[in-house]
Image (tube, grey):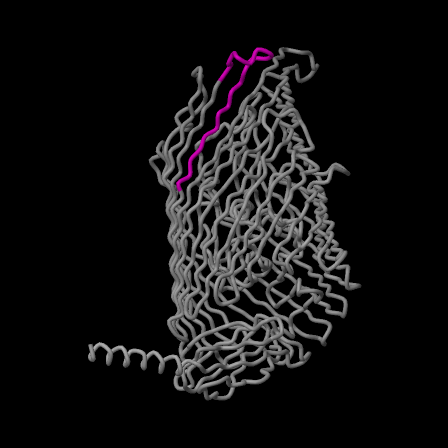
Amino acid sequence: MNTLKSLLFIFLLVLSGLAMAQTGAIKGTIIDEQSKQPIEYASIALLKSSDSSLVSGIVSKSNGAFEFSKLSSGKYLLRAAFVGYHNKYSTIINVNAGVADAGIISLSPSQQMLNEVAVKGTQINALNKVDKQSYKAGQFELAKGGSAIDVVKNLPSVAVTGEGEISVRGSAGFMVRINGKPVLTDAQTVLSQMPANAVANIELITAPSAKYDPDGRGGIINIITKKGVNDGFTIAANAQGGLPSTTDYGNTRKPQRYGADMTLNYRKDKWDVSVGGNYTRNDNAGYREGDAYTKNFVSNTITRFPSTGERSFKKYNYSGRTTINYMADAANSFSAGLFVGSRFQDRVADLLYHNTTSNLATNAPVKSTTYFNSNLQTKQGNFFLANFDYTRTFQNKSTLVAGMVYEHADLYGNTKNRNLKYPNTKDTIQYVYNPYKRPINGYRFKLDHSLPIGKGKLESGYQLRYDTQDGQFDYLVTPPTAQPNAAKFTGSLHAKNMINSVYTQYSGKAAKLEYSGGLRYEYATRTVNISYDQKPHQLDLSNLFPSANLLYSLNEGWKMKAGYSKRINRTTNLELNPIPEREHSETLEEGDPDLLPEFIDLAELGTIHNFKQGSFFTTLYYQHIKNPIQRLNSVYADTILNRVYTNAGSARLFGLEVGTNLQPVKWWSFYLGANLYNYKINGDINILGVATNVYNRAWAYSINSNSNFQLSKTLSLQANINYLSKRPTAQGEDSQFFVPGTSVKKTFMNGRLSAGLQWQNMGFFSANKQRITTSGRDFYTTTNYIYETDVFLVNFSFNLNKFTGKLKLPNSEIGDKEF
């Protein structure tokens, strides 16, 4: 018993000693050296003075205050940091019992911050840097509850069509990055799956440096997502529901719109763990009016096939994501991520056709028929991604980063195309069924090194990208019919892409000049094997991609910038697939296994002006495009048009981009972005063995604007406009597209809870309608897509602690692009 009492006494004594050894604390305050205002969310690292190893880290509160508690006795250093400011170290602090006061730590703005244009109201909403423009997603209230597309479409020079196609400076081809990580996917697909509520900032990189992948004609859009900033738990949850539709086109099904997303973040000491999930159902109802004709010069006839009817979408997606960041010490950090998700979309196009054939010379009727086309196209995909990154920081401040990504995408779907008699639609004239399976596997490995030299840094690296696709495609017709080249309508395809690249670049500052220049080399191979073709379709490319950027400060209010970048817009596996799909009764779509990628030269020259109430920038830009990829029409049969992906000669584009953020008074802020450009495409091309000349040239413009009115501390109103003028295409033009909207938001619980009402696609001035027209020597087609107007949505958001900065959740490398 005495022995037990002795052990208990010793145990309590040790606990008491440990408790007494951890009663020390350090407190202090972080402020701006110039304005003397407190800095909220500044990062403070606690380091051992002996070896500068990391002990703990916290962020400052709204008044700039911070405190480390329960510290063991010893000597420590503090390192304070905040974006746009120079890091600052404290003197050595001795910690014993009690609280050691580090006092006021003043951070001075870095030269980078001085070279940025900031619009300050309640927050910094826009920044212009040497190579990019950066925008706060929170300023676009109408995007809340939607997808990242609803945020992106508000940026200067960004436009979104009625079909959801996104363009930057008039170019549909550009690259998407998520928190700096490249996503080799088409923008529409990947951004539609990301909740707008998860987006913190958007960077528009119009003349990317050699460090970035050279993919994308229009440059790069980098999405920066939110993460927790405080130690402990951070939770954000959002829910959205659509009110009953106010537009009725007599469709067979009614749209449903609802969804929810949640992000949890836990930070403590060396660990930072995030988990996120979302479900979104976002249907679109609509109507379609089409008119088309083909000319048959052999039989001397003209066949007209106008159509009208429903065109609506059922769309939903859900996913779960997690990432784990571990900082072993000041020199070594690790990050791992996992993404599992599913996406579904079907498109109904139930159209009534009135076909007539007449004599081409006299217009005398030859025959006519009326039939009903029931068309259902389904796309599905299950996605799995995993990534791992390791960062090593050396004593000379150089860094080495190694990263790996694996992706598997199980893509499958079908098109069911039924031509039915009318009005007795129970009788089938023809049924065409196109099922497919397209599993894809992709890998990426990269190694990046950064070395401080002088007043700048030298960066270099290597990257390997590799992906394969095994596709099986069928074309089943009931009753069976004879058709030319029947063997090519069904079969399998195997595609393989491999890209090896190395780069080096140097960036630095000299007095008022900030600069960067670099060179990237790529060796790429592409192989396409088709079941009915014994000869592989092989393409080997060896290319250099130089880049250069300059930013010069004329004075405190004016700056000038210039940039150049060589780019490539690569082909997708869908564009390479020559096995046809009967997408509609009137269309047959196929790719070209010998399609060449686009090569683009980008150049820009601009000015930036910063003044008391806001900022203004303007940029002149030029693009030269070699081998522009276009989807062109030709005649397959009297009532069927072929849509073929092909290279259409060459193109050039030049334009002027302007943008401004203003806050004339405390309760009103205004944002405007506009783009005016001239596009020309020209070339003698071959479409399925038929020589064709393509030429078009015209001006186009876009305007994105919103006004925010702060009616009270907790109530705000925002009006939004997105307008895209008519613009030229290779064989015709697309009409204007106009989308106005209004939102009201009310906050509660000191901003932690908010409720909003959105009025989307306000139904005036022909809103939410778009007509697409193409023509050639022997055909003409025009289609008017009429989408829902006056859509009302209710949003609820809850935040426990604030989110900001980067949440590095993994995102699709290739699967979404091929969806």
- Asked if one can make out residue 331 in the rendered structure from this viewpoint, the answer is yes
508 sits to left or right of 462: right
Quadrant of the image for the N terminus? bottom left
- Asked if one can make out residue 651 in the rendered structure from this viewpoint, the answer is no
Which stretch appears magenta?
A: 410-430
Q: Position of residue 649 (x, y in %)?
A: 57, 44
Q: Going 75% across and 70% down the picture, which residue do you hit?
A: 611
680 sits to left or right of 213: right
Q: Going 56% across and 62% down the picture, which residue do you hit?
A: 801
Q: Main secondary structure of the magenta part?
A: strand
Q: Position of residue 599 (x, y in %)?
A: 53, 52
Please state which of residues 236 and 285 is positioned toward the viewer in this rendering: 236
Residue 765 quadrant: top right
Q: Is residue 457 above or below residue 709?
A: below
Q: Position of residue 621 (x, y in %)?
A: 66, 58
Q: Going 65% across and 50% down the picture, which residue do you hit?
A: 755
Please state which of residues 168 and 296 is positioned toward the viewer in this rendering: 168
Q: Is residue 275 above or below residue 488?
A: below
Please state which of residues 715 and 701 is positioned toward the viewer in this rendering: 715
Residue 707 quadrant: bottom right
| Residue 109 located within the stretch drawn in magenta | no
Q: Is residue 717 above or below residue 618?
A: above
